Image (cartoon, rainbow, N blue to C red):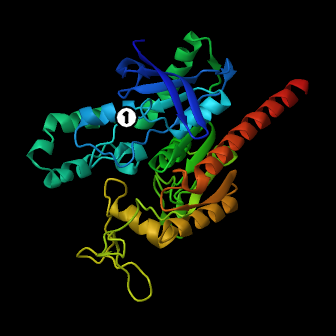
Amino acid sequence: MTREQKEIKFEKDDIVIEGTTYLIPPNPEAGYNCGFSIFVPKNCDKDTTLIMHSCNTGNNVPVHLEEANEIAKKSTYERPNPGMWFGNDLNMPVMIPLIPRVQGYDAQSLGSKVCHSDVSTLIASQERRNEEEKLSEQEIRMIQEQCHDIPTQVANMIRSSKLFLQSLGITIDDKVIAEGYSAGAKFANCFTALHLELVKACICGGNNGLGILPIREYKGQKLNYPLGVGDIPAFDYNAFCQIPQLHYIGTEDYNDPAMYKCEFKMDDEKRMIPATDESGKIIPVLDDSGRLQPLYPDNYTQQEIEQIHYLLGGNSQVRFDNNEALYATLGVNATFQKFPGDHHTVTQNHNRTYFYTNECVKDFIRNVITKEKELDDSNKTM
């Protein structure tokens, strides 16, 4: 397996990350058209569990595939991510799928259009591009091909990671801890629902209260992926409910990829914010049929936007609370926790919240591993 190797040493405040990142190129024969990276901390345990950290390159969204692939790679060694911090402190290896994010096609959030290889929003984005940013038909096909069936690609990456780590003398078990923040949290949660056989635990930070519901309909409406499992054949409800999950969000986090088109105004700090009526309700811009329209169509479809706002809640905080209540009612083994933090900065060292959230995540992982070991020991003595 051809690979590129980079030594990592990152120090900031109380954070120390040290180890080696291995960049594994795409291997269609092994079942993945995207590459992936593996971070091995300096003191990695030899018998352990793999953390699968969902790739999230944030607001740095390029217009072309080549740059998107390069940014995804650099996100694993130029700007160490929280997954690498968790792995470093817990002595666990971390695998990061190097999934590109191109303007008009948010593959990193694993939405329904991406899962169905629907590039209609990518094609529509051509209207907003200047001549240098225009995509050729070939590049659109390349993006569609590279991002085809990402869940299966990631499942194959996990299996290849096991073989690769074995070559380094590291043994991992068959199931991973799926973890991510923001779009990466949605990815981790959805991947869990799609590949229950590969996930030991799931960690979702800042996912806007949109944890996938393990039900096929809600309030008389069919809930398809990624809101529910209405179109996931042979979904194993009991298996999903048994997987430990941690969901967390900032108390003032109203970042919303499920926002609909609306009027905007300038606030006192010269920022553009949604305009509201006298009751404080956001003023939507409806289509000709009087329906809500997605502000970010590469994240959610029009039907999904309507279901999110009418069935699940009008903003991230309300949805997070509703998601917690629904998971509890459905018997999902999930913990929900809020931390002080504004907008989408709960992991940006806002009043040291970064440390609080990450310690919470690490404690959760430790508890999952400890309980699993206790169960294994108990079964051996029976």
Q: Quadrant of the N terminus?
A: top left
Pick the residue in front: 350 or 381.
350
Name the residue furthest left.
Answer: 131
Total number of numbered labels?
A: 1
In the picture shown, does residue 185 fall above or below 373? below
- In the rendered structure, the answer to whether residue 153 lies left or right of residue 14 reads left
Pick the residue in front: 336 or 22.
22
Which residue is rendered at x = 39% and y = 42% of the image? 57
Residue 359 location, quadrant = top right
Relative image position of residue 217 (x, y in whole percent) = 53, 62
According to the image, label 1 marks what residue?
Answer: 72
In the picture shown, does residue 9 fall above or below 305? above
Q: Quadrant of the C terminus?
A: top right
Amino acid type of disc 1? Answer: Ala
Pick the residue in front: 224 or 114.
114
Pick the residue in front: 260 or 291.
260
Which residue is rendered at x = 60% and y = 31% of the image? 87
Relative image position of residue 240 (x, y in whole percent) = 63, 46
Name the residue furthest bottom.
Answer: 278
Which residue is rendered at x = 40% and y = 49% of the image? 111
Q: Residues within 10 Å of mark 1 (few under 14, many from 20)?
A: many
On the question of residue 81 being in view, the answer is yes
Secondary structure under tag 1 reads: helix
On the question of residue 237 being in view, the answer is no
Relative image position of residue 120 (x, y in whole percent) = 24, 50
In the picture shown, does residue 265 fall above or below 134? below
Residue 68 location, quadrant = top left
Which residue is rendered at x = 56% and y = 30% of the image? 17
Residue 299 location, quadrant = bottom left
In the picture shown, does residue 232 fall above or below 88? below
Name the residue furthest right.
Answer: 382
